[in-house]
Amino acid sequence: MMAGGRSLEKIAATCIITLCLACLHVTSLKSQLFTRVGGLRYTTEPPISYKTLYFDQKIDHFGFLQDGTFKQRYLVADKHWHQPDGPVLFYTGNEGDITWFCNNTGFMWEIAGQLGAMLVFAEHRYYGESLPFGQESYSDSKHLNYLTSEQALADFAVLIENLKSTVPGAQNSPVIAIGGSYGGMLSAWFRMKYPNVVVGALAASAPIWQFPDMVPCGDFYKIVTQDFAKSGNNCDRNIRRSWKAINNVSSSASGLQWLSEEFSLCSPLKNKNDAVTFKSWLQETWVNLAMVDYPYEANFLQPLPRWPIQVVCKYLGFDSTVSDHQLLHGVAQAAKVYYNYTGSSPCLNTSQTATSSLGALGWFFQACTEMVMPMCTDGVQDMFEPEQWNFQAFSDECNSIFGVRPRADWAGTVYGGKKIGSHSNIIFSNGGLDPWSAGGVTSNITQSLVSILIPDGAHHLDLRYSNNLDPPSVRAARALELKYFQKWIRQAQKSTGTGSTISKKRKNSP
């Protein structure tokens, strides 16, 4: 995701998904979630088992000249599935390796037994192993031309129709779409565009309104700042002051050397441009911490302690008399909480902020075409250096990198923007700590387009495995989501006349 007039090179160093999900600025969906490092699931989670399968997808669903196909990877777990006609929970894969999302979406694994559901995790085209042109997929914009959300949704629809026609007992199975971050956006859009294929959708931390003229461009960074402000005295104020301190210290060669050593950087800072990149890297570090401010130890973007922002802020409680060097010493210690909590990193890499399981280049292309997510900072209502949103500069940068220009209003046109009241059966869940909630649906639109707010939740906390340290708000959110799923399944089974068979089988199950 991109922000302001930042260059893609600068963004690459700061982005991670996305959110990411993400991220994530091709500032937007995972400004933030896009160069994640790690990506293994928390070690106390139960082992999972699934089959890895491949389906021949059309490269182009909407034209007739390109008739090539590619292998789309998908994962299936049917241990708890009640045949015939038991429900299917379908994860709409986002910008990364599908196994990573599978391992991090514990909510689906935990409710499969209660619902008698089959789990399917479908990989998004151009990510993981699902490459339409193999190793040539990223070779140029001509090959990247089929990387769109519309094509990905069509992939999901065709895959589900195939599963229903080829898997014995699945013909009348109701399907519910589930996704988080960009995957949550896809889940919501999937229900909107293909209501004949999915009976409902859970869109977790899905910023479907983070597009031009839908929400203020500065709200994202305001939420990041609020997270730090309430996690420690003077925490946000000292981060705001740190940018000038970096400018002061980096103005000399000795200062650049001191910063490089203080932050244990893998690549020493050598000039002013390096200092700019360094600040962008720090900015995305604070963004990512806001996204993954979970109440327990986790390894989503990086291995982190519980409530990591509170830990970070312990190093940033200075008063206004602190010197630049003292302040930046605290900032360095704070950054190492994110990058070296385990103590195993010999140095900090300013080209990485998140997990390599996410596809940075693919997301950049999507941000440079249809996923235009404006972001800005003012340095007053947020703790960052002022930077306006400059669409023309962003467009020029996209053109210089990919030879394409973004369509600023296309997402609003194709997916309805804020005029979505005619749709039904979509849950929009958002965490109060998650900056992506700024572009999310945070109030009910109709009785069946509902918002679930999780005040103590960060980025799609409700989709993660349950934990003894979960706040009551996320436990309640998951319970409510499950009730909606059960309601949608009953409605679908009633319409097809399969409900009684399923319920009898469940009663007889161990």
Image (cartoon, rainbow, N blue to C red):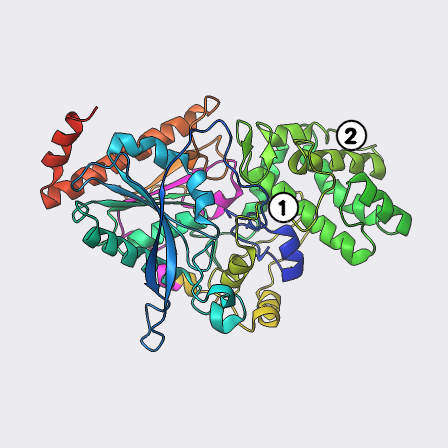
Q: Residues within 10 Å of mark 1 (few under 14, many from 20)?
A: many
Camera-side residue of 359 and 468: 359
**Residue 179 at what x, y percent from top left?**
39, 45
Residue 7's disc is none
Q: Amino acid at mark 1?
A: Thr
Identify the residue at image location x=39%, y=27%. Answer: 475
> In the displayed structure, would residue 71 be above or below residue 342?
below
Check contact, mark 1 vs mark 2: CB within 8 A.
Answer: no
**Residue 340 at what x, y percent from top left?**
68, 35
Q: Inspect this view and state whether residue 455 appears.
A: yes
Q: How many marks?
A: 2
Identify the residue at image location x=42%, y=24%. Answer: 472
Is 72 left, or right, of 261 in this rendering? left
- Specify whether residue 241 is painted magenta: no
**Residue 85 at what x, y percent from top left?**
17, 42
Q: Inspect this view and state whether residue 420 appears.
A: no
Q: Which residues are magenta?
A: 413-441
- Find disc 2 in the rendering and name its residue: 319
